[in-house]
Image (cartoon, helix red, strand yellow):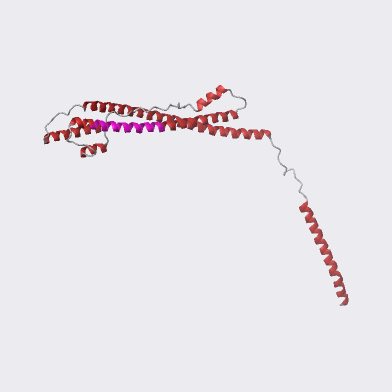
Amino acid sequence: MQTVLYQFLIEVPQAAAIWSALVLLALALLAALVARPERETPSDAEPVPDPAAEEAARLADLRRYADEVAVAAAGAAQTARRRREQWLRAQDEADRAWRAYDEAESVARRLAGAAVLPAPRTPRTPAEYAARERWLRHAAMAAHWRGELSARQLADVLAHRNGWDPRRHPAEQEIVLARVVRDGRLAGYRTAAEREQRAWRDAELAAEAARALAVEAYAAAAAVRPGPVPVRRAEAVTQTLAPVVVATAPARPARWRPARVG
């Protein structure tokens, strides 16, 4: 028993020392492997840039951008043409409204000049008042069918509202009717003139956008093709991509004037 105990006491510290030495050696090797930088293998090395491939990729991007800008420029040119056509239609409507107002004002002015004459004397009988009312109804209906009176104004005439008095002499009724028609034509012209101004501004903005996109499209197309491009050729391409140019119209003077009829 003493021999076994003696051997145990001697061999256990030796084994512990050996295991400790092995653990320290493993830790040292692990630390060395972690701290040591890895060698770059040929497969992990950065690829050598290829100038030809980079140039091809750049040209592909430029072509794609040029195509997109060309499509946008074509769409902007179509929009500019459509806006210009709308402006021309609005201008024609404003001109027609002005001519209608000018004609109505001339009629009202002529009747106002005749108003200085005394009204014809007629017997104030129920038959006379009935005849005056029939005349007013007929004149108002005719003006409505000609587009000179609105449906609401016609309703006022038939209901004797807003100053419409069927007992007045037909000469006086004609003057009042001419003034109402003139005022309505004036309001219609002002509305048409405002509509024309809005259409002109929209057409001008659309034309500016078309011109800007046309210039950008030409620049993108020129960047794809190497070599300088003549200025005349650039202007021709710009005009082809944006053929619609809305001329900057000067401020149009107000063509309506205050009527001289009271």
Residue shown at 51% from the left, 31% from the top: 73
Q: Nearer the viewer, residue 58 or 242?
A: 242
Numbered circles on residues, count: 0
Residue shown at 85% from the left, 67% from the top: 14
Q: Residue 2: image x %, image y %?
A: 88, 77
Q: Quadrant of the C terminus?
A: top left
Residue shown at 23% from the left, 30% from the top: 175
Q: Nearer the viewer, residue 262 or 130?
A: 262
Left or right of residue 12: residue 52: left
Q: Residue 44: image x %, image y %?
A: 72, 44
Residue 189 falls within the magenta-colored stretch: yes
Left or right of residue 202: residue 43: right
Residue 18 visible in the picture? yes
Q: Residue 52: image x %, image y %?
A: 67, 33
| Residue stretch rendered in magenta on the structure | 176-198
Q: Residue 24: image x %, image y %?
A: 81, 60
Q: Nearer the viewer, residue 71 or 129?
A: 129
Magenta segment, principal secondary structure? helix
